[in-house]
């Protein structure tokens, strides 16, 4: 479908004017510490959800705008508040579902932040603050693009639109599947835009075409039924720390690549990506070498990885001359796209049981699995790439992402006929989940224009 140059220019003009108020609204959202993790106050999440709902109502586009929750399956708990808005398609137009999330990661060590995490601060062309990029910028990209669509259609587009702003993505989307089930009719769509990924760099847009899955669990290694004196029995009694270190070391080969039978890799070409770029984007110290084998991006996008993200053991401050009876660690594995998370977890469990040293007892708890994603390249992806090229002025790059968005597999299962576009506003220096998270302001400006062009062109397309 060829675009209408006159309407495209109207979209450009409206998008340029929409950026400043959108950034003001983004700053207001960043000021709300909407953390969905256990132990944090629920009130900010409620306040955040209703703030988003007010922005959506202000568009004047939707027939319904609600703040809703869903049950968490297998528990008597309820999930966090989400915003759901709907507008029916007319005149044979398609329906698009726009997704983002309003919850954010915890701050972590606040002393590592250069400015207060919940006080939006502009510095050197970036907006700093927790959630400024992940994913309140995704929300405001949707809102700003919809404001543009409303302006160029006199507030009455034919495009069907559903807007789903989740409230617990960072905490595992525990009620997501139930929310989809409860609201399947309202969320049914031809195209789904998930604004929770990133771009190639601050100037070059990207369409995410693959995501790794995830298998996370707690491993406990036990060798004693009580602690013993390390001087009296060390050297003959294997303590749990020794057993855990020996066991965990079997997960990787000498180059640091995963060495677990049954974990697969995906084969696909990758763009050029230098070690210098890797060091710049990750802060890898001089003299420390990358791990694994194959191209750098294949290791990030298409190969499995295993990381120990937490450990319960005596701290340095509380260390004593004692043989530890048990040690627990959190194992976080990323699963290559194309392999189910359940199969990957089964391979990891089998490996750890088979390699437990000295007859150590191992147990597995808190298992959390999420499948990866490989894009089904259809007309919507081609339309998105065209909008990206026009919105950024630079041809987009198809990328894989080493991180996981497990709920995308739920979307595929619930809406098998929908085409899913995974986009985002982050660039490699956004530091999502880390101290000093930030949004590149020019990237946001281009992202708003891109999505506005996409919505406008969909509004002119037959379903």
Image (spheres, rainbow, N blue to C red):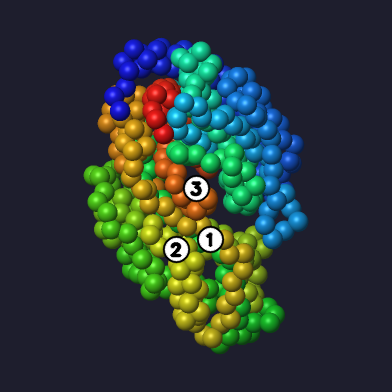
Residue sitting nearer the eye, 201 or 407: 407
> Where does the C terminus fall, quadrant-wise?
top left
Instruction: Report the residue at 40% width, 24% height from top.
Output: 460
For disc 2, the neighbor class at 10 Å (few under 14, some 14 to 19, many from 20) is many
Instruction: Report the residue at 38% width, 59% height from top.
Output: 338
Above or below, 354 relative to 309:
below
Q: Is residue 421 left or right of residue 222?
A: left
Q: Please name the residue that numbered disc 2 is placed on.
A: 340
Residue sitting nearer the eye, 462 or 127: 462
Work out how far the residue at label 2 is from the one at label 1, CA to CA, in angstroms.
Answer: 9 Å
User: Residue 422 placed where, x, y %?
Assistant: 42, 41
Q: Please name the residue that numbered disc 1 is placed on.
A: 369
What is the secondary structure assignment of the residue under circle 2?
A: loop
Of mark 1 and mark 3, the one earlier in the sequence is 1
User: Residue 325 placed where, x, y %?
Assistant: 64, 77
Nearest to the eye among marks 2 and 3: give it. 3
Q: Please name the residue that numbered disc 3 is placed on.
A: 415
Residue 95 shows in the view: yes
Work out how far the residue at label 2 is from the one at label 3, CA to CA, in angstroms.
Answer: 19 Å
> Where does the N terminus fall, quadrant-wise?
top left
Residue 105: give its label: none
What is the secondary structure assignment of the residue under circle 1?
A: strand
Q: Is residue 114 left or right of residue 207?
A: right
Q: Does the CB distance between marks 2 and 1 fall below 8 Å?
A: no
């Amino acid at each position: 479908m060829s675009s209408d140059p006159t309407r495209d220019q109207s979209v450009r003009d409206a998008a340029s004017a929409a950026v400043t108020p959108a950034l003001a609204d983004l700053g207001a959202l960043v000021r709300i510490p909407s953390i969905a993790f256990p132990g944090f106050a629920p009130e900010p999440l409620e306040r955040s959800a209703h703030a988003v709902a007010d922005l959506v109502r202000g568009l004047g586009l939707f027939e319904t705008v609600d703040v809703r929750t869903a049950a968490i399956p297998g528990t008597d708990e309820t999930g966090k508040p989400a915003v759901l808005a709907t507008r029916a398609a007319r005149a044979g137009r398609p329906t698009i579902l726009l997704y983002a999330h309003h919850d954010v990661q915890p701050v972590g060590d606040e002393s590592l932040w250069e400015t207060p995490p919940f006080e939006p601060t502009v510095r050197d062309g970036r907006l700093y603050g927790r959630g400024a990029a992940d994913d309140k910028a995704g929300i405001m990209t949707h809102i700003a693009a919809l404001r543009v669509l409303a302006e160029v259609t006199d507030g009455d587009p034919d495009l069907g639109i559903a807007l789903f702003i989740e409230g617990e993505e960072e905490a595992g989307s525990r009620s997501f599947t139930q929310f989809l089930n409860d609201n399947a009719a309202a969320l049914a769509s031809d195209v789904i835009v998930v604004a929770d990924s990133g771009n190639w760099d601050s100037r070059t847009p990207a369409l995410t075409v693959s995501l790794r899955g995830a298998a996370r669990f707690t491993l406990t290694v036990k060798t004693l039924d009580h602690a013993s004196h390390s001087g009296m029995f060390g050297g003959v009694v294997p303590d749990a720390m020794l057993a855990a270190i020996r066991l965990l070391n079997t997960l990787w080969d000498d180059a640091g690549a995963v060495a677990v039978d049954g974990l697969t890799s995906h084969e696909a070409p990758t763009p050029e990506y230098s070690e210098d770029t890797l060091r710049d984007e990750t802060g890898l110290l001089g003299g420390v070498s990358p791990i694994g084998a194959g191209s750098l991006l294949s290791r990030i996008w298409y190969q499995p990885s295993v990381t120990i993200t937490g450990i319960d053991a005596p701290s340095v401050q509380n260390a004593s001359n004692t043989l530890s009876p048990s040690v627990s660690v959190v194992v976080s594995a990323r699963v290559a796209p194309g392999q189910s998370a359940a199969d990957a977890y089964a391979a990891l469990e089998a490996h750890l049981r088979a390699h437990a040293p000295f007859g150590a007892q191992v147990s597995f708890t808190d298992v959390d699995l999420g499948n990866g994603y490989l894009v089904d390249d259809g007309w919507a992806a081609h339309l998105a790439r065209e909008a990206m090229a026009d919105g950024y002025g630079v041809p987009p790059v198809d990328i894989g992402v080493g991180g996981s968005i497990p709920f995308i597999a739920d979307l595929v299962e619930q809406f098998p006929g929908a085409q899913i576009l995974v986009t985002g506003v982050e660039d490699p220096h956004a530091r999502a989940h880390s101290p000093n998270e930030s949004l590149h302001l020019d990237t946001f400006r281009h992202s708003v224009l891109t999505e506005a062009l996409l919505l406008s062109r969909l509004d002119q397309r037959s379903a």
